[in-house]
Image (spheres, rainbow, N blue to C red):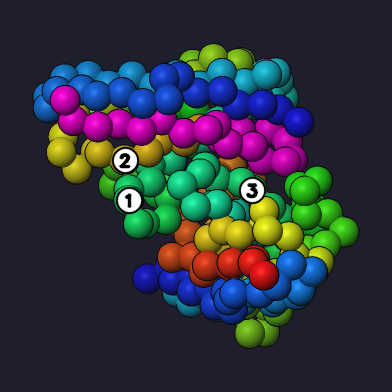
Amino acid sequence: DIVMTQSPDSLAVSLGERATINCKSSRSVLYSSNNKNYLTWYQQKAGQPPKLLISWASTRESGVPDRFSGSGSGTDFTLTISSLQAEDVAVYYCQQYYTTPRTFGQGTKVEIK
Amino acid sequence: EVQLVESGGDLVQPGGSLRLSCATSGFTFSIYNMNWVRQAPGKGLEWLAYISSKGSPIYYTDSVKGRFTISRDNAKNSLYLQMNSLRVEDTAVYYCARDKDDVAFDFWGQGTMVTVSS
């Protein structure tokens, strides 16, 4: 199985400041035939199901604010919230879609400082 | 509007069985692959099972293989999860999730709670 490890487990950021979440996979999730990274980011607010933010490591879903961005390739990925808003308080998960089982990271809790 | 509504969660004793359903609307269910994902109280997300649009192939995570069965009825726009030999560690909120072109889970239901306890 591909193990997904996120860091940090939690972070507190001031409103308007940048939040950075890292995700590392135990092996590459870059599919050579199409040069795409099968890495997805979700946001889960308290009491709600997860919401898809970013697929292909860096492609934002329709309606997702552009303060959210994803980067990285191979085994190392980053989710950046460029200017944290109060509504961004949530747990963020990365997931690999390269193979089954489709494993998730353990989650990173983002709070307001 | 895409909607997924899970049902069937309950309190069940260890060793018991339960069948979860996921009723869908707002999209052409028969052309989408589907998944079940669970979340134990206060814990992270765990993918459980995948079923393709036509019912095959099917994949499971090891922890439920041989105990859980995913199925679908395209005529009823519904997804199912038959859970047998339930264990205390199966206690979780169970979500159904639509598969976006084998890339991500783009829509999720609100979840149904399964509690396994004596």
Of helix, strand and loop, which one carries label 1?
A: loop
Callout 3–callout 2 Cβ contact below 8 Å: no
Residue drawn at 50 percent across, 23 percent down = A6
Name the main secondary structure of what is drawn in magenta.
Answer: loop
Query: In the image shown, does B107 or B46 lie closer to the viewer?
Result: B46
* Residue at mark 2: A90
User: What separation in Å lies between label 1 and label 3 (alpha carbons)?
Assistant: 19 Å
Circle number at residue A24: none
Chain ID at mark 2: A
Q: Quadrant of the N terminus of chain B?
A: bottom left
Residue B111 seen in this snapshot = yes
Which amino acid is tagged 3? Trp
* Residue at mark 3: B47
Q: Are marks 2 and 1 on the same chain?
A: yes
Residue B30 seen in this snapshot = no
B39 versus B69 height, above or below: above
A26 versus B92 height, above or below: above
Mark toward the viewer: 1 or 3: 1
Chain ID at mark 1: A
Which portion, as a residue range, is magenta? A95-113
* Residue at mark 1: A46
Of helix, strand and loop, which one carries label 2?
A: strand
Callout 1: few (<14), some (14-19), or many (20+) C-alpha neighbours within 10 Å? few
Which amino acid is tagged 2? Ala
Q: How many marks?
A: 3
Position of A64 compared to A23: left or right? left
- Residue A56: image x %, image y %? 52, 31
Quarter of the view holding residue A102: top right
Callout 2–callout 1 Cβ contact below 8 Å: yes
